Image (spheres, rainbow, N blue to C red):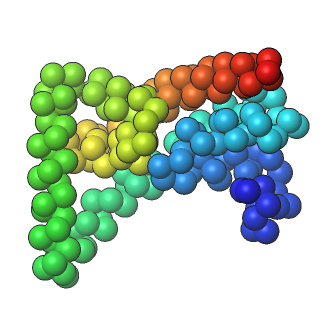
Amino acid sequence: MISNLGLIEGLPSWLKVFLLSMIPVLELRASIPWALHHYHDLSHSEIVFWAFLGNLFPNFFILLLLPKITAFARRYCRFLDRELNKLFAKTRKEHSKKFKTFGALAIIIFVGTPIPGSGSWTGSLVAWLFGVKYWKAIALISIGIGIAGAIIFSASLGVMTIWDAF
């Protein structure tokens, strides 16, 4: 499916893993199992490495640009200002107890839990909403991505081993 898309067909496997890992929601939850199944020219460590980097890369820009983009949108559009206020209030309400209980560890747990909606993109939003400094947020998100990657990699290999046994 993905390898059949004309846009990425001629790209090297490592770049495909990197790019797939950048996609919100999919992130390395999709790129690691996909690469293990389709890109046999890459070693396991290369797959994990490129998936990690691809998943981390957008967060540098998200954390840098999110304050500027939201400030601009809120200043020039009342509707967006209202909707962003609702979204931010809801997010703070849902996560403030966890953040107070676990502190910065909450971001690691949040990003490191490999379920849809809890990846690095959302982790960047949560870090920004709770005022975590840029480089600290990058470090916490990196640790979370590493944990999620280890879980996904281990689970993928286990499933593939069981699948190959049949």
Residue name at image x 15 percent, y 45 percent: 92
Is residue 86 placed above or below 121 in the rendered structure?
below
**Residue 3 rendering spot, x and y as whole percentages:** 78, 55
- Left or right, 104 with respect to 2, comes to left
Residue name at image x 28 percent, y 27 percent: 106
Front one among 105 and 26: 26
**Residue 10 rendering spot, x and y as whole percentages:** 85, 61
Residue name at image x 45 percent, y 55 percent: 61
Is residue 148 placed above or below 28 in the rendered structure?
above
Is residue 145 placed above or below 26 in the rendered structure?
above
Confirm whether residue 157 shows in the render.
Answer: no
- Left or right, 58 with respect to 93, comes to right
Q: Give the image quarter of residue 48.
A: top right
- Image quadrant holding the N terminus, namely bottom right
Residue name at image x 49 percent, y 24 percent: 147
- Left or right, 94 with respect to 43, comes to left
- Image quadrant holding the C terminus, namely top right
Front one among 160 and 78: 160
Front one among 119 and 142: 119
